Amino acid sequence: MNIQKSLDQAFKEAMKARDDVAKRTLRMVRAAIKNAEIDRGAPLEEAAILAILQKEVKTRRETIAEAQKAGRADMVADTEAEIAVLQKFLPQPLTEAELETLAREAIAEAGAVSPAQMGQVMRLLMPRLQGRADGRQASQMVRRLLQGN
């Protein structure tokens, strides 16, 4: 089943279960997807929907950081619950070893030997991650490997 259908089904289930957190979160994500489709003028493919989900999770993590600074434990708890709802639709994250393997393959394919060639490696690596690791993690891994060479 594709992600869009999964989101729709989960929204219906949240409505039946009267799960306010899931309803609110899924409604926001579905609206973000719909807005992106309207902007693009065509339905989104799975990769674009995954990117939207990841963006929503990232936004909520930033919200948690701000709420912690402000001492808003209630907001932190609500936002963590929203992240839990969203993560059900994201693929399992890569382990450190899996990310390292993919990074080494991209480095070898690009023929990179120094951090100056990091851009070439990242262009090869990012499509392979498919939402299972964020760009920050990937760039840190590539930088570490290139500096170690």
Image (tube, grey):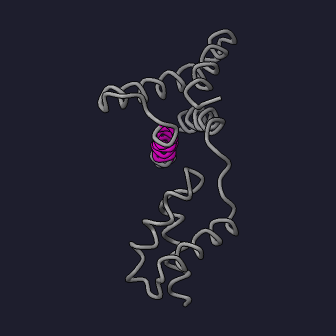
Residue range corresponding to the magenta coloring: 49-64
Front residue of 34/110: it is 110
Residue at x 51%, y 46% (from the top left corner): 61
The answer, for residue 70, to whether it is visible in the render is no
Please identify the residue farthest to the front as the structure is shown. 109
Vertical side of 117 occupied by 28: above or below: above
Residue at x 62%, y 26% (from the top left corner): 6
The answer, for residue 81, to whether it is visible in the render is yes
x, y percent for residue 29: 48, 29
Instruction: Name the magenta segment's main secondary structure.
Output: helix
x, y percent for residue 38: 32, 25
Residue at x 67%, y 15% (from the top left corner): 13
Image quarter where the N terminus lies is top right
Vertical side of 41 occupied by 54: above or below: below
Image quarter where the C terminus lies is bottom right
Front residue of 1/60: it is 1
Residue at x 67%, y 9% (from the top left corner): 16
Front residue of 63/41: it is 41
Q: Is residue 52 left or right of residue 37?
A: right
Tell whether position 76 is magenta: no
Which image quarter: residue 95?
A: bottom right
Which image quarter: residue 119?
A: bottom left
